[in-house]
Image: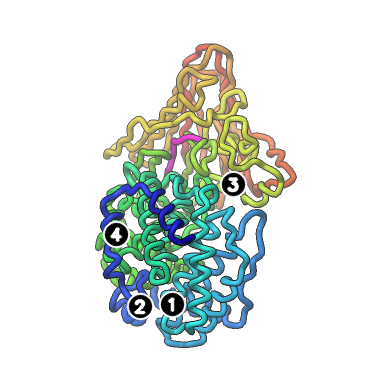
Amino acid sequence: MKRLLTIVTLAAAMTIGTASAQNLDFEHLAPHPRLLLHDGDITAMRTLPSRSENAAAVHDRIIAECDKVLDAAPVERVMTGRRLLSVSREALKRIFYLSYAYLTTNDTRYATRAEQEMLAISAFSDWNPSHFLDVGEMTMALAIGYDWLHDRLSRHSRSIIGTAIYEKGLRASENDSQAWFFRAENNWNQVCNAGMIYGALATYERAPEYCKALIEKCLASNPTAQKCYDPDGGYPEGFSYWDYGTGFEVMLVAALQSALGTDAGIAAQESFMRSASFMTYMVAPSGRCYNFYDSGSGASCIPAKYWFARQTNDPSVVAVDERFLQQGRIPSDRLLPIYMLFASGLDLTRSHMPASRTWVNYGIAPVFIYRSGWNSPDDTYFAIKGGRASSNHAHMDAGSFIYESDGVRWAIDLGMHDYNILEQAGVDLWNMKQESPRWEIFRIGAESHNTLTFNGHRHAVDGMAEIGYHYDNQRTKGVTINLTDVFSADAQSVERTAELDKNDRLTITDHIVNGHQASTAAWNMATNAEAQIIDDNTILLRQDGKQLYLKLRTKADAKAVIRPEHQYKPFEIKDKNLRMVGFDIHLAAGEEAEIEVTFSPQQK
């Protein structure tokens, strides 16, 4: 009776968003292994290393990681602050890798070790549903092992693991206060829905009606997150979270394709399908990414992009990723086996870099990117963004940019701060309101970013910075961003234009109409370069034997500055070799000013 009530509750909670969710053909559910794998895929993965040096390197890395795990103890339920997430991620990596290793080598040691891992996790008291990402990833981990090793597992082990998936994974989603991911518009929706769908598909025969209702509920929820790619394919949470959220979205849709023969309409969403190209442009000539918001600057091959390449039959989508592999930059990604799966269906000899050198997306976090070429670390790269600080994982960085030329990243973004450190210090980190202590953290607040501040004030957290227009022709390429809403407390209007001339020389121009009181506008830029003030209008930067001049032109009262070292809170990560340079502009009440800063390797 309790199970019947649960099924009814799930069904009542559903609001089916697409016809595809209502038309899933569960009567023709594929046999095990049904997650990700189609007929012939295992053979294709086995033979791929003989056809591709990159694939051989990836395969060898997976096997080497599995060999390390063979004699290691299973993961334990050890929390990090309020999270079990690091344990869930390690479990997913181990079980996915070991299952792949068994299917491609027939070495039973890998299957036995995966079984041991799953039984240990099944014995956990719970998978920490108060932080549901932990449940989502753990459920996916056990679902893959249960499915890929189904015929290798003993009946007793299948029973224990299947029960754990049902009780500690699927049933956890019934708690509405903990399973708020169903209403989320971000990566939580993608990761947690993917985990629930994996668990339900893997163990479908144990509770068909329950699993069917849960899968349909997940698919009704998922379009809420898919809207984030609109209208152009940009991902509002940045590079690292595209890898996370979209990686699990790919896992979700690929499992539907293999198990039920449908993509549930996900692949028909044009903005979603364009998002892999967004990630290609987000990698700079240095091989580092444009790391706005909570991202690090490191970059490597992204396995999920190969699904897009295979789906569209366009290997150019992964040209940057193949180059990373040629350089030996193999990710430690827990989803790495999907590289072998999706790359096996591609002719990677056709891979080539995109023709366009410019990318622009509007939407929640508008971004403009220009690069002068695709083949040299000395190419010029410029990227700038708009957006609002109250968005998920956002920083106070509207109007900020990064800039590379001559093999140097001159203008940098500090990227993310470790969450657990801040949470353990009592910072109300996920409070995105105007007075939140979140904005006191140097890496997150406005003063560390390559943008403006007025009178030392915070940006307006709900102020939206939109791209007004962009252009790309033989003479110039550039973009204009309206920052007026961001600075509404201090200025009547603020507009930032970034332009690169035919020689790729960058000029950033801020057109300001000051508010009704005198103001000091701070033009800031973070850099790792040595800095020297030449005069009130000129700053010289030196790094790696190269030099760059920042040259100010304005009629306003302005002065070049190298800002004092930031006084970090005791628990904050200190940024080594960081220098904050810029210009202070003093504006009279109502004054209209144009602040033009040119970036040039020559002083004149």
Residue 436: percent from the left, percent from the top? 62, 34
Q: Nearer the viewer, residue 437 or 370?
A: 437
Q: Nearer the viewer, residue 585 or 364?
A: 364
The residue carrying pointer 3 sits among few (fewer than 14), some (14 to 19) or many (20 or more) residues within 10 Å by Cα, namely some
Q: For mark 4, give the secondary structure.
A: loop
Circle nearer the N terminus (1, 3): 1
Numbered badge on residue 263 = 4
The residue labelled by disc 3 is 528
Q: Residue at x 41, y 34 (%)?
A: 498
Circle nearer the N terminus (1, 4): 1
Numbered badge on residue 45 = 2
The residue labelled by disc 1 is 100
Q: For mark 2, give the secondary structure.
A: helix
Circle nearer the N terminus (3, 4): 4
Q: Is residue 118 visible?
A: yes
Report whether 208 appears left or right of 596. Answer: left
Range covered by the magenta-colored residues: 382-389
Q: Nearer the viewer, residue 533 or 183?
A: 183
Give the spatial CA distance, label 1 vs label 4: 23 Å
Q: Residue at x 42, y 85 (%)?
A: 105
Give the spatial CA distance, label 1 vs label 3: 42 Å
The image shows residue 62, relative to residue 256, as above or below, that is below
Hey, what amino acid is under mark 2?
Met
